[in-house]
Image (cartoon, coloured by chain):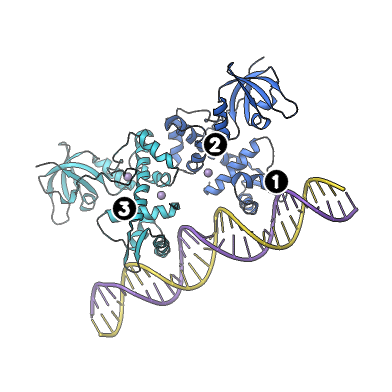
Chain colours: A blue, B cyan, C purple, D yellow
Amino acid sequence: MISLSPAEENYLRTIYNLIAEGLEKVSTNEISAAVNTKAASVSDMLKKLAEKELIDYRKYYGVSLTEEGRKRALHIIRRHRLWEVFLVDKLKFSWDEVNVIAEELEHVKAPLLVRRLDEYLGFPKFDPHGDPIPDEFGELSSKPRILLQEVPVGQSGKIVSVSDSSAAFLKYLDKVGIYIGAKVLVLEKTDYDGSQELFIDNQKKVFVSKEVAGNIQVMLHPS
Amino acid sequence: MISLSPAEENYLRTIYNLIAEGLEKVSTNEISAAVNTKAASVSDMLKKLAEKELIDYRKYYGVSLTEEGRKRALHIIRRHRLWEVFLVDKLKFSWDEVNVIAEELEHVKAPLLVRRLDEYLGFPKFDPHGDPIPDEFGELSSKPRILLQEVPVGQSGKIVSVSDSSAAFLKYLDKVGIYIGAKVLVLEKTDYDGSQELFIDNQKKVFVSKEVAGNIQVMLHPS
DNA sequence: ACATTTTTTTAGACAAGCCTAAATCATATA
DNA sequence: TATATGATTTAGGCTTGTCTAAAAAAATGT
Ligand SMILES: [Mn+2]
Ligand SMILES: [Mn+2]
Ligand SMILES: [Mn+2]
Ligand SMILES: [Mn+2]
């Protein structure tokens, strides 16, 4: 099992995350935006990853992960999310600060390290953003989720994760009082622009745009 | 304050450590051995580091650190040793396992991370090998030390650090019962080969070669 | 259907870090 | 002091990962 460079790992994790957003293939430009690298460079890298049989790559068409690529991506994501838990639980970072740091820590590949860290953290199942942490074998304990966007008026649920880990987005959520675990009730929806009015924890009314609601996952309460 | 690559950091830390062994300049070949890289490549890198004014470099002569280079080296060493403490104290690694892992972790350069880690560990002053951890400003709290080699027969002291962090050496010390903090009394010395007979913790007799005694530092008990 | 725009790939270049082989310098020795 | 030996540097080359500019393919709009 030949080892991957930090750059290769970043591409694999990025492709996995983009695909996890629903799609079954990703474009060069989407990857380019996500890894903050010019499309020409991405094309180069995709050729190399395809060469190593980590992705399926058809020119001008798009990219998906092979079984091996998926397995590798999940191991990287496991490291990434465990470090995020460490940073929040032990070092008292806030959830908007940990993504960038974990992007560096995720590439440290001492075999025992990840297992010991996992144990030390008490085998957490989810990271600070509500995303599931794969186990050693790359298995995900997934919960049934629905986008906040999709929750009908009158329905309530619990916020279980967010799909944008940028500091800007997370700080915005902090500001309006939305957090992982919060109870959310959809009070009203505006068809015109897709914005919603929410009732958080039976306490606080919050207006959110369609963009925001599209980046929040909810587990519905039985209604 | 322009940021250094992992490779540059490894060279700086290595040069610092070699110089800390007593010498005031280091040779290309010594560095080559320490970073496990061919001498020709070391020459290349030395030119670059001199260009950046991190080292004083005179061709065919040797290398020393500039003030800036020393400062940088101490910051890298701070990260390295703090991670070593983390690995031993929190993740229950043994002291012979942590050097290689810390060699990777030391390059993670999130500014807040090191301070938080330091705090989390309780501001340790020494790493698992007895080496002092520089503070944020690069200051070292050094204790007066003497090589075990140099301790006269009949004198006793406390083992405070070891200057070889290889797994082989540290495992050997574990095996014979030598550890940081142990009381050591020199029972006998053989002039011929420089080997010694020691009495550890008033309990156990141990024979050590000159090589071993040269890699152990002792703080003498007032006699 | 054709022209325009957007996306993607190719071509060519560059810096970082490494290597081997061939100079060159320093030194130890005869 | 001339020479052999060892240490160091230079020359030339390679891989990785990036870039810009140009070409090619795909998508879009009229
Ligand atoms: Mn990363
Ligand atoms: Mn996360
Ligand atoms: Mn290192
Ligand atoms: Mn150490």
At a point 47% along the width and 28% down the height, the residue shown is: A123
In the rendered image, residues at marks 2 and 1 fall on the same chain: yes
Circle 3 sits in a helix, a strand or a loop, which is it? helix
Q: Which of marks 1 and 2 precedes in the sequence?
A: 1
Q: In this figure, which residue is indicated by the disc labeled 2? A: A167
Q: Between A30 and B136, which is closer to the camera in this rendering?
A: B136
Q: Going by the image, does A94 lie left or right of D7?
A: right
Q: Identity of the amino acid at label 2?
A: Ala
**Neighbourhood count class around disc 1 (C-alpha, 10 Å): few under 14, some 14–19, many 20 upward:** some
Chain letter for the residue marked with disc 2 in the picture: A
Q: Identity of the amino acid at label 1?
A: Gly
Task: Give the number of the mark in front: 2 or 1.
Answer: 2
In the rendered image, residues at marks 1 and 3 fall on the same chain: no
Q: In this figure, which residue is indicated by the disc labeled 3? A: B17
- Badge number at residue A209: none
In the rendered image, residues at marks 3 and 2 fall on the same chain: no
Please tell me whether residue B2 is drawn above or below residue A77 in the rendered image: below
Quarter holding residue B79: top left
At a point 45% along the width and 29% down the height, the residue shown is: A89
Q: Going by the image, does A6 lie left or right of B159?
A: right
- Rounded to the nearest whole Å, what is the CA distance between mark 2 and mark 1? 29 Å
Task: Give the number of the mark in front: 3 or 2.
Answer: 2
Q: In this figure, which residue is indicated by the disc labeled 1? A: A62
Quarter holding residue B11: bottom left
Q: Identity of the amino acid at label 3?
A: Asn
What x and y, as percent, mark residue A46? 63, 50
Chain letter for the residue marked with disc 1 in the picture: A
Chain letter for the residue marked with disc 3 in the picture: B
Q: Between B173 and B59, which is closer to the camera in this rendering?
A: B59
What x and y, as percent, mark residue B150? 16, 51
